[in-house]
Each structure stands twice: as structure tokens, then as C-alpha cells.
Image (cartoon, rainbow, N blue to C red):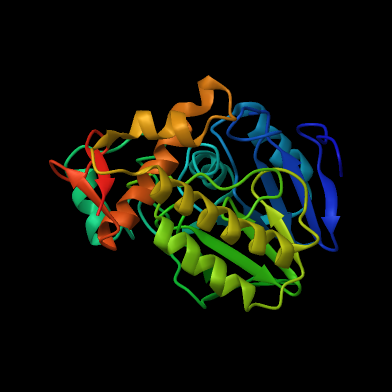
Amino acid sequence: MTKAPQTGIAHEVAPGVRSVLAPNPSPMTHWGTNTYLVGEAEIAVIDPGPDDAAHLQAVLSATRGQTISHILVTHAHLDHAPLAARLAARTGAQVMGFGAAHDGRSTIMAELAAAGHTGGGEGVDSGFQPHTALRDTDTVQGADWALEVVATPGHFSGHLSFAMGDILFSGDHVMGWSSTLISPPDGDVRAFMSSCARLQKRPERRFLAGHGAPIDTPAERLEWLIAHRLEREAQILNALGPEPQTIGDLAAQIYSDIPPRMLPVAARNLFAHLIDLTERNLAVATPELGFNAGYCSA
């Protein structure tokens, strides 16, 4: 699929799997959020999407005559999670996800959040709370489907993917149209790289992402994502010198090829890398680790 599907219309993307595109296109969401409908009799809704009345009606219309039995959320960003509550109220289905919006943060990310280092290019659905918490290797089953829970933190601390046969519902961890935003304190570069390495060892041959078209060469995409992060790390280390520089100054140097309006988003990615480099003693933060600190070589 080379162009956006029509919003609000369910179309088949794999046997037993349909997608309904939410009407929330943006530079951060591409065409919009893909809401997946899994099954024939009992339906699992993966990523119900933004709190949008038209999208709610589209999902209900696409499943008329069927039963929505499960609502699974890959992560608690505003473009993926908020409609879960309204959909659950209409259908009686259980909402399932990792946990509350900020669960799963590492110690350093929790400390940064407590110090006020929040923000970034995507909003968090702070009130998200599933009925059922899922953990890695759990299985969620319906009448004619079974989904394995695959923990893939990195883009978000509690990010989950879901595997079914040779398909992986990869949320925002792996997308074909863009690299993945990693915005602290919910985004974590070290966790992202670990999750990518883990997915490289898995058998799934097709990824259905939270945004954009299906990924039919996931091994190549994972290789690119890892190489992209390693290249960005090398660029940062090359840009760091003996004198502290702000994240804004570093972003302007390193991301010289993107539109100026995207620099704030790039700065969040850069912050994620600098946290990791500081933790590995490859960079120094002055006076202390934070978004407004100065950074120099170790």
C-alpha cells in the first residue's frame, strides 16, 4: 500500500485481520493511527486510537454482528489509548495493556520525570489504566485467535507488541515510514536497542505498525533502525567537545537536514541519546543530567 487508505473504512491487511484508519494525520502519526480488528466472531481491537467520536463509530460499524471481546493497547500515547475507555463502555470488553501510563520507567527515567523533565513530540494519556495488566509472554485468546504478548519498551516504557502466527503488531516500536521517536522520560534508547535486538531473533515475517503501511521486510527494517541509532550516537559523540553545549545547539548541528519545525522533536531524541551516553560515561552533563543541561565529551 503506497497511499493512505480511506479513514473509517475497515480493510483486510492479513487473513483474519482488518485495519481501520483513524482521522488523526500529522507529522507524528503519518496517515493516522491504525486500529486493528483481529478475529471473525470474537474481535480483539488493538490500539483503539484517539478519543474521536467518528472513529469510535467506524470501529463499531466495522464489527456490527460480531462481539468485541478484548481491547489491547500497545502504549499509552494519546493517538493510541484514549478511545479504549469509551469503546469498553459501549461493548463491555476488557481493556488490556502494560499498566498505568507511567508504569515501567527505569530508575533514571523516574528520577527525570520527578525533576520535571517531561514533554516531547507526543502526548501521554496520563489517565490510562487497563482493566488487566499484561506481561511479556502472556497469551490473550479469543474464539479463533491467540496473541502472544511481546514486551518492547523503548519508544514508551510500557510498550507492548503482539504476535500472532507470522504477524507482529509492532505499535510504534517499528514503523516503515519513519524512525521511532524516543522522548524521555517515557522513551529510552537503551531499552529501544534491546527490544530491536530481541525482535531480530523472533520468527514473525510481517509487521503491522501503529502508523503507515504493513512492513513486509521486518528484518531489513530492524537492521536499519539499529544502524540509524548507532549512526546518530556517533554523530553526537563527534559533535561533543570540551565545552558544554545545549541540546538545542547540538540538535541544530546534528539535524541540519530537517525542517526547523521538527527540531523540538529531534531535541527529544537527542536528549534520549545523551542520557544513555551520560550513563555510560561517554558524555558529561553540567551541572546535572537534564534537558536544559550543557553536555560535553567525557
Is 27 or 32 nearer to us in this picture?
27
Is 233 placed above or below 58 here?
below
Query: Which residue extends farthest top?
Result: 261
Residue at the (31%, 51%) spot, across then down: 275
Horizontal side of residue 177 vs 256, given as left or right: right
Number of on-image labels: 0
Looking at the rendered image, the quarter that the C terminus falls into is bottom left
x then y, percent, for residue 286: 16, 41
x then y, percent, for residue 107: 23, 60
Horizontal side of residue 246 vs 237, given as left or right: left
Observer able to see residue 48: yes
x then y, percent, for residue 261: 52, 20
Looking at the rendered image, the quarter that the N terminus falls into is top right
Is 19 placed above or below 250 here?
below
Query: Which residue extends farthest left?
Result: 287
Residue at the (61%, 29%) spot, across then down: 27
Is 285 placed above or below 118 here?
below
Is 207 placed above or below 113 here?
below
Is 181 or 249 nearer to us in this picture?
249
Observer able to see residue 120: no
Residue at the (76%, 33%) spot, across then down: 8
x then y, percent, for residue 7: 77, 32
Is 271 or 17 nearer to us in this picture?
271
